[in-house]
Amino acid sequence: MKRKEFLQKGLATGTIIGSSSWVAGSDDSLQKTQDKRVPRGYDVDYEEVKIERPVPGKPHKGKVLLAIQPHSDDIPLSAGGLVAKLIDEGYTGYLCSVTDDARGEGKYEQNRIDNQKIADFYGMKGSFELLMPHHQLDSIGIQDLKQRFIFLIRALKVDTIVCMDPWGHYEENPDHYVTGLAVEAARWIAGANDYPEHFAFGIGPYTPKERYYYSRAGETNNLIVDISKYIDRKIEVNLLNIAKGPAGNNGVKLRERLAKDGKKLTILEGDDYTANFNYAKTFVFTDNKRLGEKYGLEWAEGYHYMTEIPFDNHVPDPNSPVEEYIRKNAVPK
């Protein structure tokens, strides 16, 4: 599929309803860039991307967000800014953590604590733990995982999903790609008539309309989200990951190591929290800094954005085959 076709199918343009910075449809909130392609990851220059910026007020009030992560650090690291932004704009949020994160001594109990703290930090209404085997999702029947996602999507009436990209490239972790595949399949099936036992208890079909899918390499990204306003929130939520993640207590550890050598860094002075915060902002999220600067932003996250939100009924889709045919073949009457 050509990139132009991919973007047309995966990203409606101009008049998307309910999509943060696109509500206004102005040049200030929607920006197109055209660049040359270079190697993988955050160094990729996309031929065409959209930029989503923060919107004042509560444009998403009444909508439900489900942030799904294979491990306790995935949402904070990859989507910590976006989730803060969407909830600030009115979403009711829920967190779903897929694996038990049981690898490593003492991590099982601490990860349960960390996940709840993350949900509480964002002001989410709930945190769900599926407790699937850590690093072994490729060995389980994906049907079980799909069914659990379908139930959550229907019961919560989820409008927007944030999760691993099922089409992401260069993904090594089976928990990541299996979660992404199960979520996308569940999202589609949740709107069908499968599992009628749900209906008997008043839980009917429901299909999320928007997906923000993140990936390790970022090659499928077609959306850049401006998180400059939320970078400190992203760092704060990552500091809650005591059991895992690259933020944690690393500032204090580095300060102690330097002290043994009779050295110090100004950014690590002050209390332990300040040292850890400054360490994370300086060293952990350099990709977010670099990606933002590429698009004229201070800090940014990249996503493969997909939507089923239709165009306004009174405004024809300018990218549809009908409109394209009209432009090429219509003659004066």
Image (cartoon, rainbow, N blue to C red):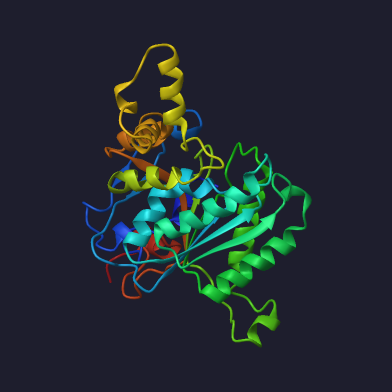
Q: Quadrant of residue 325?
A: bottom left
**Image x and y of residue 159, in percent:** 46, 69
Please say if 169 is above or below 82.
Answer: above
**Image x and y of residue 281, in percent:** 36, 34
Residue closer to the observer: 1 or 123: 123
Residue closer to the observer: 315 or 42: 42
**Image x and y of residue 60, in percent:** 34, 68
| Residue for point 40% across, 29% down | 283
Residue closer to the observer: 23 or 230: 230
Q: Quadrant of residue 326?
A: bottom left
Quarter occupied by the C terminus: bottom left
Tell me if I can see residue 189 in this picture.
no
| Residue for point 46% across, 27% down | 253
**Image x and y of residue 291, in percent:** 37, 36
| Residue for point 51% across, 74% down | 157
Q: Judge left or right: residue 102 versus residue 301.
A: right
Residue furthest to the top in view is: 261
Please say if 300 is above or below 25.
Answer: above
